[in-house]
Structures are given as C-alpha cells and as structure tokens.
Amino acid sequence: MRTVPGRTATLETEIARVNRIGEIGRAGAVGAGGVVERREIPVALKDILRGRGEDVVLEMDDILWVPDSRAKSVLNRGVEAAIQMATGIVVWRR
C-alpha cells in the first residue's frame, strides 16, 4: 500500500473509491482473451475510520482512491498564513 505522507489532514474521506479491474469471460490473465471490466466501488471511509462502517475487502491490484479536499487545504493554508502574520507582527514590535 502506498501513501502520501503528511497529507492525511486534508483528505476527503466521505467520497473515497476503490478502483477495481477484473476480467469477464474466459479464465486466465487479463489480455488472454477475456473482456476487461473496470469498476468504481464507493467506500464510506469516514465511517470505517470511526469504527461504524463495514470494512471493504481489497483484492489484488485494487486502488483505494481518496481525493484531497480543496476546502480543507485552503482553510489550513489560511490558518498558516494568519499565524505567520501574527508572528511577524510580534517579532517586529519588539
């Protein structure tokens, strides 16, 4: 499993998805004559993290996609900027 370190605070956990690629038809590896099926499975990640939701069983080659929340990112950046400004004012007034 691959994660992006330091980005968990701004993830949009309400609209997570599992991207699953499977094969319909003949048995065998993808590309051996079968038809490739792509599915998006919605995941209630917020509920799972709180212990209220049912776990989703991941299969080989599944991708759990959790998008970044722009609103949370903007809010975090605004708070950081406000703290920097306040620190600058305190330092320069001494």
Image (cartoon, grey):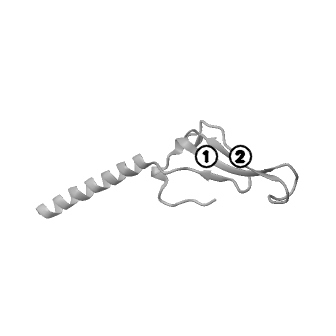
Callout 1 secondary element: strand
Q: Name the residue under label 2.
A: 57
Identity of the amino acid at label 2? Val
Front one among 86 and 61: 61
Please tell me whether mark 2 or mark 1 is closer to you in this view.
1
Above or below: residue 3 compared with residue 54:
below
Identify the amino acid type marked 1: Arg
- Residue 79 is left or right of residue 21, and the answer is left
Asked whether, in this view, residue 93 is left or right of residue 62, the answer is left
In the rendered image, residue 69, in percent from the top left (x then y), is placed at: 46, 48
According to the image, label 1 marks what residue?
17
Residue at x-position 51% and y-position 61%: 5
Q: Which residue is drawn at 85% across and 60% down?
A: 32
**Location of residue 53 by image quarter:** top right
Dot 2: few (<14), some (14–19), or many (≥20) neighbours within 10 Å?
A: few
Q: The residue tagged with tag 2: helix, strand or loop? A: loop
In-front residue for pair 42/82: 42
Query: For the point 85% across and 49% down, which residue is it?
Result: 25
Residue 60 locus on image (x, y percent): 74, 55
